[in-house]
Amino acid sequence: MFVVNTDSIPGFQIVEVKGLVQGNTVRAKHIGRDLAAGFKNIVGGELKGYTELLTESRREATVRMMEQAKQLGANAILNVRFSTSAITAGASEIMAYGTAATVAPLN
């Protein structure tokens, strides 16, 4: 499956637009990550625990979006975007969304 953040794929034509697809996950902070983050706020540096959490969350949201596109019979998702929002203190939602389509090579 093609997953791109553009509105077209070079060398391919859009045969059919299937519609909007999305995938999301809500993740909470881990107490160990919070303690490490608090220390990093004092001394500075990357919050690797949070970086890993967000990377895992984006991957999960993308997989869920791709599963929805497959159910629609799509072989591509165009204009993919990610959104993040706070749900409660310590928990965030990551959403991936785009346009599911069927594409075919140009003749």
Image (spheres, rainbow, N blue to C red):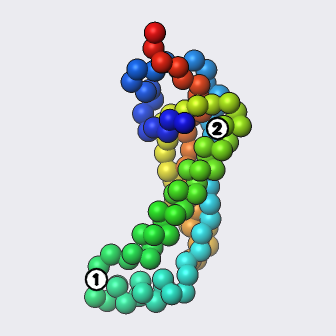
Query: Where 67 falls versus 90 (above or below)?
Result: above
Q: Under tag 2, what secondary structure?
A: helix
Cα–Cα span, label 1 and label 2: 41 Å
Q: Is residue 99 above or below residue 46?
A: above
Density class for disc 1 (Cα within 10 Å; few <14, some 14-19, many ≥20) is few
Q: Which residue is mark 2?
A: 69
* Residue farthest to the top, as pictured: 107
Q: Please identify the quarter of the rendering in which residue 76 is found.
A: top right
Please name which of the two marks, 1 or 2, marks the residue nearer to the observer: 2
Residue type highlighted by circle 1:
Gly
Task: Name the secondary structure under disc 1.
Answer: loop
Query: Which residue does the image show at 29% across and 79% down from the upper left?
Result: 45
| Placement of 91 over or under 105, stated as above or below | below
The residue lying at 54 percent from left, 23 percent from top is 103
The structure residue drawn at horizontal position 46% and vertical position 9%, both measured from the top left corner, is 107
Is residue 29 visible to us here? yes
Image x and y of residue 48, in percent: 39, 75
Q: How many marks?
A: 2
Q: Is residue 45 above or below residue 16?
A: below
> Could you say which is closer to the camera, residue 91 or residue 23?
23
Say left or right for 9 vs 20: left
Q: Earlier in the sequence, mark 1 or mark 2?
A: 1
Quadrant housing residue 60: bottom right
Q: Position of residue 80 (x, y in %)?
A: 49, 41
Residue on which the image places disc 1: 44
Q: Nearer the viewer, residue 84 or 33?
A: 33
Q: Position of residue 8 (x, y in %)?
A: 44, 26
Q: Which mark is residue 101?
A: none
Which quadrant holds residue 85? bottom right
User: At 54% from the left edge and 36% from the top edge, which residue is drawn?
Assistant: 1
Within 10 Å of disc 2 (Cα), the crowding (few <14, some 14-19, many 20+) is many
Give, as a three-letter code, the residue at label 2: Ala
